[in-house]
Image: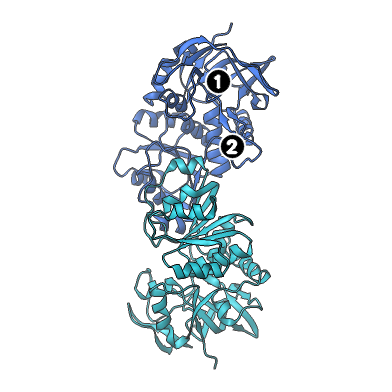
Chain colours: A cyan, B blue
Amino acid sequence: MSSMILSGHDRPLESGEILPSLPEEGEVFVRLHAAALNKRDYWITKGMYPGITYPLVLGSDGAGIVDGRDVIINPSIHWGDDPEYFATDFTILGLPAHGTFSDLVKVPEENLFDKPAHLSWVEAAALPVCGVTAYRAMFTRGRARSGERMLITGIGGGVATMALLFGVALEMEVWVTSSSDQKIARAIQYGAKGGVMYSAPDWEKELVSKAGGKFDLVIDGAGGKDFSKMTQFMSPRGRIVIYGGTSGNIEDLSPQRIFWKQLDILGSTMGSPEDFSRMIDFVAINKIKPIVSHVFPLEKVNDAMEIIARNEQFGKVCLEIPQP
Amino acid sequence: MSSMILSGHDRPLESGEILPSLPEEGEVFVRLHAAALNKRDYWITKGMYPGITYPLVLGSDGAGIVDGRDVIINPSIHWGDDPEYFATDFTILGLPAHGTFSDLVKVPEENLFDKPAHLSWVEAAALPVCGVTAYRAMFTRGRARSGERMLITGIGGGVATMALLFGVALEMEVWVTSSSDQKIARAIQYGAKGGVMYSAPDWEKELVSKAGGKFDLVIDGAGGKDFSKMTQFMSPRGRIVIYGGTSGNIEDLSPQRIFWKQLDILGSTMGSPEDFSRMIDFVAINKIKPIVSHVFPLEKVNDAMEIIARNEQFGKVCLEIPQP
């Protein structure tokens, strides 16, 4: 198979051929039409994950064709039988198994879902990782309800922009934070009610003043020093869902505020097969199109990786895969 | 009515007569046989609560007789219709309404529950605040299940000792922390599997080593610097329920550990009428007797308060109320 291959630590991906292993029972090859990048791919090139062996084909997101069926791939491999938590042999496509920066990828057949008809190949490839992560965070863990006020911190990344689209589709009142005025403006174009710059010293007060009330749900990928400020603007029984921690450890968190308001602080990762299936249904029923920030041909994956490295995207950075 | 009365900031309670206001519709007078103290009563004498007016009869816990019926009083006044969160006019018996350090107390009739027959008056009075708080934290919020491993931090107080009894009755494996060897030994007498001194520098490692595995549920009334250590020994999908914050704000909390393990950090307070009713049933079915640490006659309430002030109790500090 023709792939973009990582052959060592901190090196660019290089075009090459990988001889695929034979499929085991229940596995199939998908002829890929599009893929998408995640921060995880970038971190793997920097050697930041355990168990990396070379050569490796990166990529967790992909969509393509198997036996004439248009499919989207659930990248959660061997989640197992418990919807609450993944099994011990759970992995994510693209490490250790070869991923989607390739013309072919081998996956368990149970990981294939019908591509919603309203999505292009690139839009379909933009969906899996961020779609299922946002869905589990918002719905399975965060119990999002129509009419509630939701904050998404750090708008721009895949999970955050997908949560924005899901919240707007659910008729929630969605607010965002960012370090970029442009990203806030783009979020408003996609249906956010408004946003504030988290670089401002009293951003939490500005946010409550603009929103005119408290928040029922927060989807947070940052943590860090600003996290504890959020407990001030939560409604009673509010939920803060944590899916990432790019700003480091949480400090100065008041237990009194947590117990008096009976807050939930909930960790969430990628989702179960049920989460993935429900996410695809939600996207299909609501005709949601993931926000595509940039599209590159597969051979330009290193340019795409630069966008991810610098967090310049608003939505997903995707790859078109040439067909033979 | 004959009561022990707080007549000013930081003063001892003094014996005296209060002319009770007439009952409104749905209110009744309970002739009290026993009462119990909570840390809240102590903090009120120190002026640490808003809205204190003098003279005030303290006391949230009580049991007694109404029209020949033996009753235990639910101290959550006007919780409201939502089991998830209390209504805006919610109060706790003993501030602002006169409480149970008295021969009579006026409460809404809906707050009366039949006293379980296996409990003495003092044991019944020991139950309400700590029983409903422990029940909501463990069951309604923490989803405690038989066979799980539970940690109760800071054993000794009413909520912690009640959680110990509930966990043992549910056939959980219960562990405790304390700053006192004697309190750990007493917890073991009541069915705890073991415990560690939280004053030891690596108490969290010692605990995991003794317990031989990770924890599914923590009931924590402390917060503070040690809180984040607990995320290390939680099982995937573990729950940490916070009902107090005596050790101050939480520091150095890793978002990565929260999302990878999909932990729940859950605030909990006193409970809804449903929580109270289920707690009474659980106590009656399992013939649970609250741990009574000290008993004083009502007129010696200031001596009882000293025990609470110095955290010397293991279980509840109770008051016997003389009958006319």
Q: Can you identify the residue that label 1 sits on?
A: B98
Counting labels gives: 2
* B77 shown above or below A198: above
CA distance for labels 1 and 2: 19 Å
Residue bearing the label numbered 2: B88
Q: Are marks 1 and 2 on the same chain?
A: yes
Q: Position of residue B27 (x, y in %)?
A: 67, 22
| Chain identity of mark 1 | B
Residue A140: image quadrant is bottom right
* Percent coordinates x, y for residue A216 in the rendering: 56, 52
Looking at the picture, tell me which residue is in the foreground, A226 or A281. Answer: A226
SS assignment at label 1: loop
Report crowding for label 2: few under 14, some 14 to 19, many 20 or more residues within 10 A (C-alpha): few
The residue sitting at the top extreme is: B324
Image location (x, y in percent) of residue B202: 31, 45
Which of the two labelled residues, at mark 1 and mark 2, occupies the earlier sequence position? Answer: 2
Q: Secondary structure at mark 2?
A: loop
Q: Quadrant of the N terminus of chain B?
A: top right
Q: Amino acid at mark 2?
A: Thr
In the displayed structure, B92 sits above or below A36; it is above
Front-lying residue, A165 or B174: A165
Q: Can you give x and y, in whole percent of width and height, for residue B221 in the image?
A: 44, 37
Give the side of residue A116 with respect to residue A12, left or right: right
> Residue at 46% across / 47% down in the picture?
A232
Q: Chain of mark 2?
A: B
Q: Residues within 10 Å of mark 1 (few under 14, many from 20)?
A: many
Task: Say if B238 sits above or below A193 in the image.
Answer: above
- Asked if residue A19 shows in the view, the reply is no
Give the image quarter of residue B65: top right
**A222 relative to B18 in the view: left or right:** left
> Which amino acid lies under the numbered mark 1 shown in the image of this protein?
His
